[in-house]
Amino acid sequence: MKVPRYRMPALSLDSHFLKNAIESKQLARGESYERFRKIIADKLGFKSSVLCSNGFSAIQLAIETLGIKKSKIVVPAASTCMAIVNAVRASGNVPIYCDLELETASLDSKKLHDLILTENPALAISPAHFGLVKEYDQEIYQVIKILEDNAQAFLSDITYPVRRDSYARIYSFYPTKGLNAIDGGAFVSHEEYEMNKCSNISNYDAIRNDDGVIRHNFRMNNVNCAVGLDSIDGLTVSINRRNEIKSVYSKVLENFDNVTFIDGPKTILQKFVLRFADEKSRNMFRVKMINHGIGASNELNYLPPKKRLVLDGARELSKTTCSIPFYETLSDQELDYVTDKLNKVLKAISD
């Protein structure tokens, strides 16, 4: 049996909103955009949202919206998606990496505090890896702006809607990120000024003369919003199925001392990521699972230039973590197969 690491839910051209967008020829602009924008804000507990073309554009817009001028220091995670670092550089700012906590793969609070004292950064980008959203001590929020990169935490945030002290959040609607719109992103904030500014610079549709403001062509297409709207109805099924799979996998892991999985409170996991005691065990596990036809992948890459900076937590996570199939379209037969091989492979590498 072959079980891919990820399988996107089937996309039907007969789906209500997508069908309407195609038949009305509203691919770039149309009524789905405004409907999707309002639904996203409502589900996340915000008054409004700004939709954009992808997660990268959401981060760049957020950096500019939050007033982070060129040549400022921005703190991303040392192991995260390259889109974050690219957005920092595209905005004209300088990334200085922060180490990660081993248990959550989130920014290490102590290391972030040290960076604040030594580097005086203007912004920290806090990743919600695998669906885990980090909440910091009040002291951190008082001395630095925190942008939550919740690309992988949409399901967590709509299930446990709370108002945190972060300045703003971004989301991605790529198929592997919880809500599938094929591609797309969003910026949300409780500050009306920030929402208006982000909306103003996200596109130049209504601009008729040069006012000296730099704007982007980052607007989300109507057809992507239509796909997103059709995907919303399946979110409850997705959440329930993920919790079922998590329960099955976690019971297997209870029998082994040399492996855990990354999880946290108020979390709907987007990915099921195993953490091994050492790199050798991780590599053996990955190879054996792949040989059984099961997708297994290293999820965290160590980004800092290796000769210039060593961040122990991020480097260890990059060497000891591995994901296995975890998605709502995983069938019962596939789940039984993965669970059986998971148990046997873990026993084999434990001997």
Image (tube, rainbow, N blue to C red):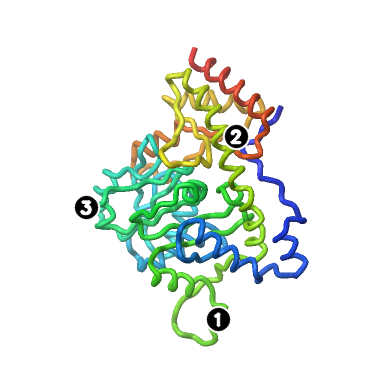
Identify the residue under disc 2. Answer: 325
Q: Identify the image quadrant of the N terminus.
A: top right
Q: Position of residue 15 (x, y in %)?
A: 73, 56
**Tag 3: amino acid:** Leu
Image quadrant of residue 17?
bottom right
Q: Is residue 71 left or right of residue 171?
A: left
Viewer-proximal residue among 157 and 64: 157
Crowd class of label 1 (few under 14; some 14 to 19; many from 20; radius 10 Å): few
Tag 2–tag 1 contact (CB < 8 Å): no
Q: Which mark is residue 206?
A: 1
Identify the residue under disc 3. Answer: 117
Q: Position of residue 180 (x, y in %)?
A: 61, 52
Viewer-proximal residue among 300 and 180: 180
The residue lying at 68 percent from left, 33 percent from top is: 331
Please tell me whether mark 1 sits on a helix, a strand or a loop. loop
Alpha carbon separation for disc pair 2 and 1 = 44 Å
Q: Position of residue 62 (x, y in %)?
A: 43, 63
The residue lying at 71 percent from left, 47 percent from top is: 10
Q: Is residue 67 left or right of residue 336?
A: left
**Tag 1: amino acid:** Ala
Q: Return the disc, 2 or 1, that comes first in the chain's sequence.
A: 1
**Tag 2: amino acid:** Pro
Does 248 sit above or below residue 190?
A: above
Residue that extends furthest to the left in the rendered view of this protein? 117
Viewer-proximal residue among 42 and 70: 42
Viewer-proximal residue among 26 and 155: 155
